[in-house]
Amino acid sequence: MTDPGSSRAQSPPDAMIYAGARQRAIRFLRNYVAHRESVDGLRKLIFLYREIGDWREAEKVLLAHENTLLEYLPQSFGEIAITAGKSDATADALRLWRLRANLDRSNLEGLDELAKTSAGPQLRALYLQLKLDDPRSTAPDRALRILR
């Protein structure tokens, strides 16, 4: 392959992932997205970083390409928050979840999973505060029901 931005570059990482070679797939995808910014490639790279528990790198990729990934920002912030919570990075998990909530308060997908991490105990306080800050929103009440 002479063009590192070729669409054929998407297949080798899939094979590497399937074979359990996540680190090799990450290196391959980093090179790929450096030459051809692709939503699929970026999402796969973020997924791989989350899979190996490296939420910091996942966040860096997301923030470096936020304009390309605009549609996926809320979901991605939530997924990275869960990974941070599983890594006992409580403050960062809550920070990332707040970013998600600021972008899309109504989608609570993943909240139950985040509640099972180190960030769990502080989520109730976050949604009680959101309820005070935005009394017209139904999301805090729905979140508090999930967190019971």
Image (cartoon, grey):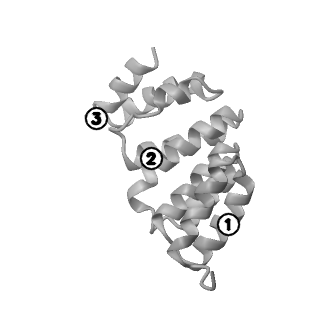
Residue 19 in the figure: left or right of residue 126: right
Residues packed near mark 1 inside 10 Å, few (<14), some (14 to 19) or many (20 plus): some
Position in image of residue 26 (x %, y %): 68, 59
Number of numbered markers: 3
Residue drawn at point x = 50 percent, y = 73 percent:
7
Secondary-structure class at tag 1: helix
From this viewpoint, which residue is outermost toward the bottom?
2
Q: Which residue is mark 2?
A: 75
Amino acid type of the residue tagged 2 in the rendering:
Gln
- Quadrant of the drawing holding the N terminus: bottom right
Position in image of residue 30 (x %, y %): 65, 67
Q: Which residue is mark 1?
A: 28
Residue 77 lies, with reference to residue 147, above or below; the image says: below
Of discs 3 and 2, which sits in the foreground?
2
Q: Which residue is mark 3?
A: 137
Residue drawn at point x = 58 percent, y = 23 percent:
116
